[in-house]
Amino acid sequence: MREPAKTFEDLLVWQKAHLFVLAVYRLTAAFPNHETYGLTSQFRRAAVSIAANIAEGFRKRSKAEKSVF
């Protein structure tokens, strides 16, 4: 049995989300320059928000609070 996570970075789901962010940044680096403030920005913000929500929800106490994240 695994011991409980001490930080959000110990969570497997956060680690996978972080790898996803890195992959999205690599992928969107090849997008055309005219998409810098369009699709590139949207993809990157969406990917980052996954990992950020996991991190933010990690310290929430109640199930109701956690479900928001």
Image (cartoon, rainbow, N blue to C red):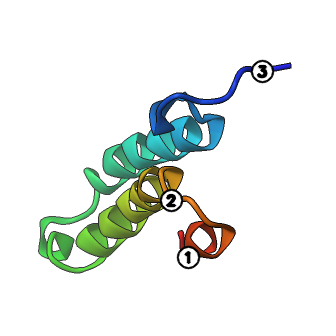
- Pick whichever of labels 2 and 3 is earlier in the sequence: 3
Q: Nearer the viewer, mark 2 or mark 1?
A: 2
Q: Is residue 17 above or below residue 31?
A: above
Q: Earlier in the sequence, mark 1 or mark 3?
A: 3
Instruction: State left or right for residue 1 relative to residue 11.
Output: right
How packed mark 1 is, by other alpha carbons closer than 10 Å (few <14, some 14-19, many 20 or more), is few
Kindly state the secondary structure of the residue where label 3 is placed.
loop
Q: Could you say where residue 62 lies in the image, as x and y percent from the top left?
A: 61, 66
**Residue 1 placed where, x, y %?**
86, 19
Residue 58: % across, % down: 51, 50
Q: Earlier in the sequence, mark 2 or mark 1?
A: 2
Instruction: Give the residue drawn at x 58%, y 40%.
Output: 16
Query: What is the CA distance from the residue labelled 2 to the residue labelled 3?
Result: 21 Å
Residue located beneath label 2 in the image: 60
Tell me the amino acid under the disc marked 2: Lys
Cα distance in 3D space between marks 1 and 3: 25 Å
Q: Depth check: 13 or 6 in front?
A: 6
Circle number at residue 68:
1
Q: Which mark is residue 2?
A: 3
Which amino acid does the dot numbered 1 rest on? Val
Tell me whether circle 2 and circle 1 mark residues in contact (CB < 8 Å).
Answer: yes
Give residue 36's quadrant in the image: bottom left
Tag 1 secondary structure? helix
* Relative side of 46 to 1, left or right: left
